[in-house]
Amino acid sequence: MTDQTTHTINDEDEFFSGGGIKYFGFPIVGTTISGTVCDKMVTRQQTDMKTKEPLTWPDGNPRLVLVIPLQTTLADPQVEDDDGKRTIWVAKPGGMYAAIMDAVKTAGATAPKLGGQITLQYIGDGEKTNPGLNAPKIFRAHYVPPSDAFFAANGNGAQQVPAANQPWPPTPVPAAAPPQVQPQVYAPPVAAPAPPAPAWPPAAPPPPGFTYGAVPGTMVASTAAVTPPTAAPAAASAMPLAQGVAPQQVPMPPGMDAAMWATLTPEAQQALLGIAAK
């Protein structure tokens, strides 16, 4: 991961001193640090806080931590001329180590490097398995490898690294799903309802000599005898009579046809009688 220079620490002050750089702890959930790796990273062997004895694993290997110095913008008002440098202590295995390595791999690197930017946040506690120890802390991390410009400016191994105050990387917002286009279903136009057919046969009677047919709108000649209309009797000719004078019967002259005589007016009859008398 980095240079494996091992040192033995004899007391807690030295353990947390970080070679003169202030140690940064994570007392509560949500505590965050962000900064640029500003000096050489070293490994150190942990010691028991009470007995001062170096700690080892069951196989005898030393229990090491990696001390990473960061240049931050933090300023402790109780520390005069606070330069903002802090150290984080990364035990392997551990929650902090796992978070940093995941971030390093995500950035396409193999290990934190001088000039790289680290953001680390305490986000919760794991399951407590040892009654005598605190629950393991869970972290999340973000790492940005050093830029080509940094390497060009620090090719001689200079340790002066600009301070960094990187905000926590924003959580990527998933791209909005394109709106789903509903398939358009063709609907044929609906024909307007036809007007109601007129009643058949109609209430009015058909013309004389016809009847309504079975097919609407048709008529057929009637086979029943058609009675011709009766002519109104002609009004009898009446000659005006003198008021109060009754018509007189004129006797028919001999040899006159009775039917024709009846058709003549009294005046005509009188005229014919006068002719016959001469």
Image (cartoon, helix red, strand yellow):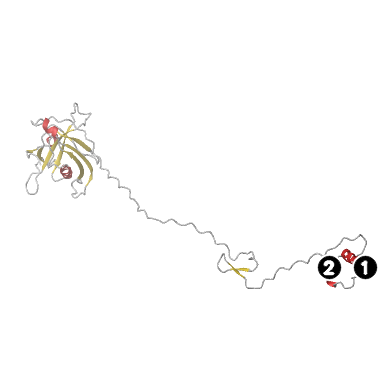
Would residue 116 be found to the left or right of residue 237 on screen?
left
| Residue 184 spot, x, y in % from top left | 36, 53
Residue 34 in view here: yes
Would residue 174 be found to the left or right of residue 15 on screen?
right
Would residue 160 be found to the left or right of residue 123 on screen?
left
| Residue 68 spot, x, y in % from top left | 14, 37
Q: Which residue is mark 1?
A: 277
In front: mark 2 or mark 1? 1
Residue at 11 percent of width and 33 percent of height: 151
In this figure, what is the number of numbered marks?
2
* Residue found at the far front of this picture: 278
Q: Which mark is residue 26?
A: none
Q: Quadrant of the N terminus?
A: top left
Is disc 1 surrounded by few (<14), some (14 to 19) or many (20+) residues within 10 Å? few
Please tell me whether residue 103 is drawn above or below residue 224 in the rendered image: above
Local secondary structure at mark 2:
helix
Q: CA distance from mark 2 to mark 1?
A: 21 Å
